[in-house]
Amino acid sequence: METKKRLFIGTFLKTDKLIENYPRVKSDFAGIVEGKWVEDWNLHFTYHFLGEVDSTNAEKLLADLKPITVEYHNPLVLRGLGCFPNANYPRVLFVEIFDSQNILQEIHLNCKSLLEKYNFQLDTRQFHPHLTLLRIKQARRREFREKIQKYEKEDFGKVDRFSVHLIESKLTPKGPIYQILSK
């Protein structure tokens, strides 16, 4: 029997400054939003969510992704908070990721080209690198808009290198458990 894996291509990313300030952000939004905060060890962003993939295709995909799933020496700046789809109807609270050399967009497009031969149903929305902090169930909109403006230019740190991985996501009642498949 063929087993399936829930997969995505992503980058785990955090800075000391973000981890240091994360409790303050959570505290500032307490009473304004309800939802599930991402654990600090699970902070990541996604290039492409692939969904359920059978094990045979996962192995082939892992081999094909080898040139992309490497370490990149490129600065990324984490600055400011944003939300999807907008501040009037927030569903996701995130940290903005700035990439002056557009390497993240290039990685996204390279992955997309490779994934097309596998016939994955890829997200058609414009790629917007972001580090999800909170999946919002409810928000007091006016207070949320005011609070998010407070963090508009907040510096959450910088990294000089990052890695791209094929990641398996196992859903549990306590939240997802991620396992890096690419080394």
Image (tube, rainbow, N blue to C red):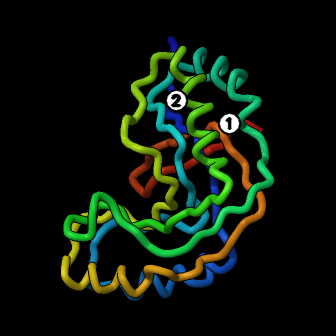
Task: Give the residue furthest to the front.
Answer: 101
Give SS at disc 1.
loop
* Residue occupied by mark 1: 181
Q: Looking at the image, do the residues carrying marks 1 and 2 touch, with CB atoms under 8 Å apart?
A: yes
Q: Quadrant of the C terminus?
A: top right
Determine the image quadrant of residue 13: bottom right
Q: Residues within 10 Å of mark 2 (few under 14, many from 20)?
A: some
Q: Amino acid at mark 2?
A: Lys
**Residue appearing at x 68%, y 54% in the figure:** 101
* Residue 153: % across, % down: 50, 81
| Viewer can see residue 3 | no
Report the residue at 66% width, 17% height from top: 60
Above or below — where is 160 with respect to 64? below
Does 95 appear above or below 26?
Answer: above
Residue 159 in view: yes
Give the number of marks: 2
Q: Position of residue 94 (x, y in %)?
A: 44, 66
Which three-letter amino acid code belongs to the residue tagged 1? Leu
Say which of 59 and 73 sits in front. Answer: 73
Residue at figure coordinates x 57%, y 68% from the top left: 40
Q: On the image, numbered disc 2 is attached to which residue?
A: 5
For marks 1 and 2, the one nearer the N-term is: 2
Residue 54: percent from left, percent from top? 52, 19
Residue at point 19%, 82% (across, down): 142
Q: What is the spatial separation of the Cα atoms under label 1 and label 2, in whole angstroms?
A: 11 Å
Residue 157 location, quadrant: bottom right
